Amino acid sequence: MALQKVCLISELEPGEVRRIDSPPIAVFNVEGALLAISDICTHAEASLSEGQVDGQTVECPLHGACFDLRTGEALTPPATEPVQTFAVVLQDDNVYVQVDESR
């Protein structure tokens, strides 16, 4: 596992999201909890970082599928497959995600 920098902690306020491109991961600040998921909807490959957040769920902006930000579970159709989740690490004033380099 490797750490990939997302941003400074101060750059991710509650209610905000940051995205990294490779691999595409979205990190959401939900009331102070930092939650990271794959940024690609499992239904139609839309960017989930552009979706609407409601509590601990995000709605895909393309077809409205909802995903649990904690578990990645697909909560509503048309998505049926979960999105991958990632561990978030705070270190030296930075936000990192743990990524598997073998993927």
Image (spheres, grey):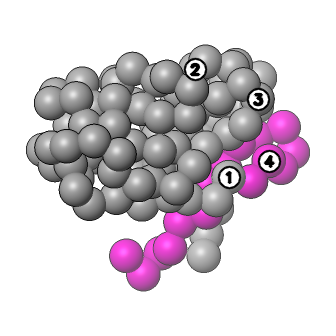
Q: Quick one: label 4, few (<14), some, or many (20+) residues within 10 Å?
A: few
Q: Quick one: label 2, few (<14), some, or many (20+) residues within 10 Å?
A: some
For numbered disc 3, what is the local secondary structure? loop
Q: CA distance from mark 4 to mark 1?
A: 7 Å
Counting from the top left corner in percent of width and height, residue 40 is at 28, 46
In the picture, the disc for residue 59 is: none
Q: From this viewpoint, which residue is outermost toward the right?
A: 92
Q: Are marks 4 and 1 in contact (CB under 8 Å)?
A: yes
Q: On the image, numbered disc 1 is attached to which residue? A: 88
Three-letter residue code for mark 1: Val
Three-letter residue code for mark 4: Leu
State whether residue 80 appears in this view: yes
Report the mark closest to the observer, 1 or 3.
Answer: 3
What's the residue at 51%, 43% (across, down)?
69
Q: What residue range appears in magenta?
A: 89-103
Q: Quadrant of the C terminus?
A: bottom left
Three-letter residue code for mark 3: Gly
Q: Are marks 3 and 4 in contact (CB under 8 Å)?
A: no
The quadrant in which residue 80 appears is bottom left
Q: Quadrant of the N terminus?
A: bottom right
State whether residue 21 appears in this view: no
Of mark 2 and mark 4, the one earlier in the sequence is 2
Q: On the image, numbered disc 3 is attached to which residue? A: 32
In the picture, the disc for residue 90 is: 4
Counting from the top left corner in percent of width and height, residue 77 is at 19, 43
Q: On the image, numbered disc 2 is attached to which residue? A: 16
Q: Are marks 1 and 2 in contact (CB under 8 Å)?
A: no
Camera-nearest residue between 31 and 22: 31
